[in-house]
């Protein structure tokens, strides 16, 4: 084993900046090729990003490779707020706050049967921002979840038909929530609050591929749920002036998921992938925060509870890849993501309905290097949701929401 290359690969995977944010919560944009194919990229040849899309497919990597990917996501959208009588009391739009999904990958073939891979990429992340003087700000005017999963992986190729992989997942989340606290009796904002904290937790994943023949292959990937016990700093800035601090604590469970994929090669140049993802969003039933000094202001309760009760959902994707020559290829994809947010569980943290994503991309490669680019447009859809007791509205309607996507990836063989 080339120890210098291994050390460099590990450093690239673990230390690359992992800034993430997007319209939504689940992130599927782990490489430019993956973006171009709508996330249906479970069976790519010689692609280090297989660590993220399908660990069992790192057995398709020859030798030693490193890869970095940068995806830009820019969310846009509008909303309307209503009072208890159904009368519109405010209309507005989000503050455009773009985010990045960064992926770093390293794969090494140990021998004809064994592979090692490691990746650092976001599975869950989001960012949303609204005007601080708006009524929407009583629910949230700034929300950000930075997420990174580091996944050391071992894969084994049993024969020409079967391959499998198992890996650990070290998951990091950094959460920041800001809102104006609206007093329902006084019917006024009594101050701005900020909750900021971070957490590390462990999970695992497993995957298997089966090739029926040279043209048809199926694969399954399971990723475990991950429970975070979040310790945070809470600050309140009362309208009367000053600052009040408290320790905050909350528990959030990120959902487990299943990926099921099918790959068909029409010939040596063209192939089609189908992918279905089942995400058990029902684990996200609430976002409850406990405060250490609740009665200091005479305003905040000891627990700031927010019911979510999301429903489990499916994401379907189709991707097409065509090689014009040994060096140039084009890709296209489409994905449909079901809405999982109920009327009584929606908020301005993630004002996302069903999502349709349209994407295209291109790739250049030679014997040592691969460069890929992709563009996508995500129709986020509409979402209606109820206001909470401390919101300055009774219901909300998010509409005309979309996200612009641009991605670039670079891979190097050694």
Image (cartoon, rainbow, N blue to C red):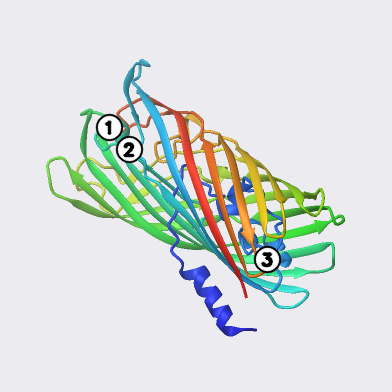
Q: Are marks 1 and 3 in contact (CB under 8 Å)?
A: no
Of mark 3 and mark 2, the one earlier in the sequence is 2
Closer to the eye: label 3 or 2: 2
Task: Give the mark nearest the N terminus, 1 or 3.
Answer: 1
- Pick whichever, 132 or 323, lies toward us: 323
The local crowd at label 3, few if under 14, some if 14 to 19, many if 20 or more residues have their Cα within 10 Å, is: some
SS class, disc 3:
strand
- The quadrant of the rendering that contains the C terminus is bottom right
* Res. 134 mark: 1
Residue 406 percent across, percent down from the top left = 50, 48
**To which residue does mark 2 refer?**
130
Q: CA distance from mark 1 to mark 3?
A: 48 Å
Q: Residue at x 64, y 56 (%)?
A: 53
Q: Is residue 348 left or right of residue 49?
A: left
Residue to which mark 3 is pinned: 166
Which residue is more in the foreground, 331 or 326? 326
Q: Does residue 371 appear in the picture of this structure?
A: yes
Residue 71 is situated, as x and y percent measured from the top left of the image, at: 49, 52
Above/below status of 107 relative to 149: below
Tell me whether circle 3 and circle 2 mark residues in contact (CB < 8 Å).
no
Residue 152 visible in the shown view: no
Indicate left or right for 356 with 45 as reference: left
Quadrant of the rendered structure where residue 153 is? Answer: bottom right
* Quadrant of the rendering where the N terminus is positioned: bottom right
Using the numbered discs, state the Cα–Cα distance from disc 1 to disc 2 in whole angstroms: 7 Å
Determine whether label 1 and label 2 are within 8 Å by CB: yes
């Amino acid at each position: 084993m080339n120890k210098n290359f291994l050390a460099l690969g590990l450093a690239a995977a673990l230390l690359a900046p992992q800034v993430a944010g997007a319209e939504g919560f689940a992130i599927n944009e782990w490489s430019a090729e993956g973006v171009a194919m709508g996330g249906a990229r479970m069976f790519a040849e010689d692609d280090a990003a297989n660590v993220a899309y399908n660990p069992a497919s790192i057995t398709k990597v020859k030798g030693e490779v490193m890869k970095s990917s940068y995806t830009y996501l820019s969310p846009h959208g509008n909303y309307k707020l209503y009072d208890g009588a159904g009368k519109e009391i405010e209309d507005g739009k989000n503050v455009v706050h773009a985010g990045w999904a960064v992926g770093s990958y390293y794969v090494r073939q140990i021998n004809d049967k064994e592979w090692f891979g490691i990746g650092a990429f976001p599975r869950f992340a989001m960012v949303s921002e609204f005007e601080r003087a708006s009524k929407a700000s009583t629910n949230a005017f700034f929300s950000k979840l930075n997420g990174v999963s580091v996944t050391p992986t071992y894969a084994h190729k049993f024969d020409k038909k079967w391959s499998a992989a198992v890996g650990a997942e070290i998951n990091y989340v950094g959460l920041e929530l800001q809102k104006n606290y609206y007093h329902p009796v006084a019917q006024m904002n009594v101050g701005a609050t900020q909750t900021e904290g971070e957490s590390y937790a462990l999970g695992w994943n497993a995957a298997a591929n089966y090739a029926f023949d040279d043209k048809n292959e199926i694969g399954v990937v399971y990723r475990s749920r991950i429970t975070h016990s979040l310790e945070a700093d809470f600050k309140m800035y009362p309208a009367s002036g000053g600052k009040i601090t408290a320790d905050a604590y909350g528990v959030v469970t990120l959902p487990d998921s299943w990926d099921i994929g099918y790959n068909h090669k029409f010939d040596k140049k063209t192939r089609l992938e189908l992918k279905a993802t089942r995400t058990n969003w029902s684990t996200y039933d609430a976002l409850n925060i406990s405060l250490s000094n609740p009665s200091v202001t005479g305003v905040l309760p000891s627990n700031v509870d927010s019911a979510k009760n999301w429903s489990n959902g499916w994401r379907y994707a189709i991707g097409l890849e065509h090689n014009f020559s040994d060096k140039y290829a084009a890709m296209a994809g489409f994905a449909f993501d079901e809405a999982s947010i109920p009327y009584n569980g929606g908020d301005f943290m993630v004002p996302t309905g069903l999502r349709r994503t349209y994407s295209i991309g291109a790739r250049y490669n030679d014997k040592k290097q691969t460069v890929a680019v992709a563009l996508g447009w995500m129709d986020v859809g509409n979402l209606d949701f109820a206001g909470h007791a401390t919101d300055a509205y009774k219901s909300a309607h998010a509409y005309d929401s979309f996200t612009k996507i641009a991605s670039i990836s670079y891979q190097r063989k050694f």
